[in-house]
Image (spheres, rainbow, N blue to C red):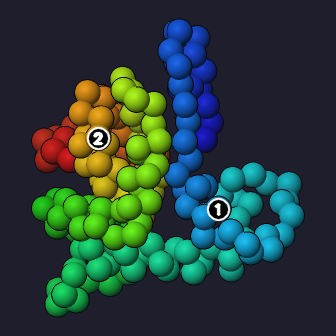
Amino acid sequence: LRGVAMLKGAGVDAGHTVRVIDLNHRWLRRGLAGVDVPPRSQFLGDHDRDSELVRPLQAQLLDFYLHAADPGGMSGLTRDDVLHMQLDHATALRAAERLLQTSYGRWLSEQVCGLPEKPEVVGISVFFAGQVLSALALTLLTRRIHPQARLVWGGPHVTALQPEIAADARYALA
């Protein structure tokens, strides 16, 4: 989150109101409500997670992804396929649309509706391939609810794919 904090600081320094929303954190807190979570270690963030506690939440999210990408279960896609984003562009966009029809999509909608009334810019940070379908769904949803907002993707996954993104206009279609 260092990059996000730096972007927030730059925006505030330039006179903008900046709000950072960690949807991953919110999803985990929602799923772990009422669960006795052990105290934190010396590490923060993803390195401080209790893998046994979050594994069922990851499995649930991967099930949402898999059913959205392969609703009839006929294409032979696996959880690993959606976790590692082994989908073509058209399948990924259809899956993102279907994901919005799930309870996870409704939860995402609640989060987007909670944004300031007319955001100028909405940034989406993607750390790894397993977050791409959520980011695509969030992008489609944000465009519907806040069509005036400029959407910007960033994060390690986007940085790693920079040459591919620059060379392929389909990455801008979401």
**Tag in front: 2 or 1:** 2
Helix, strand or loop under label 2:
helix
- Residue at mark 2 to residue at mark 1: CA–CA distance: 25 Å
- The x and y percentages for residue 156 are 46, 46
Which amino acid type is shown beneath numbered disc 1? Arg
Q: Is residue 138 left or right of residue 173?
A: right
Numbered tag placed on residue 73 in the rendering: none
- Measuring 25% from the left and 49% from the top, which residue is drawn there? 140
Q: Secondary structure at mark 1?
A: helix
User: Label 2, on which residue?
Assistant: 145
Whether residues under marks 2 and 1 lie with C-beta atoms below 8 angstroms apart, the answer is no
Quadrant, the N terminus: top right
Is 137 placed above or below 37 here?
A: above
- Counting from the top left corner in percent of width and height, residue 49 is at 70, 65
> Is residue 115 at all visible to an observer of this figure?
yes
* Residue located 41% across and 44% down the image: 113
Above-or-below relation of 13 to 85? above
Q: Position of residue 6 (x, y in %)?
A: 59, 26
Q: Is residue 54 left or right of residue 117?
A: right
Which of the two discs, 2 and 1, labels the residue nearer the N terminus? 1
Q: Is residue 83 visible?
A: no
**What residue did someone put label 1 on?**
29
Please provide percent x and percent y for residue 149. 30, 29
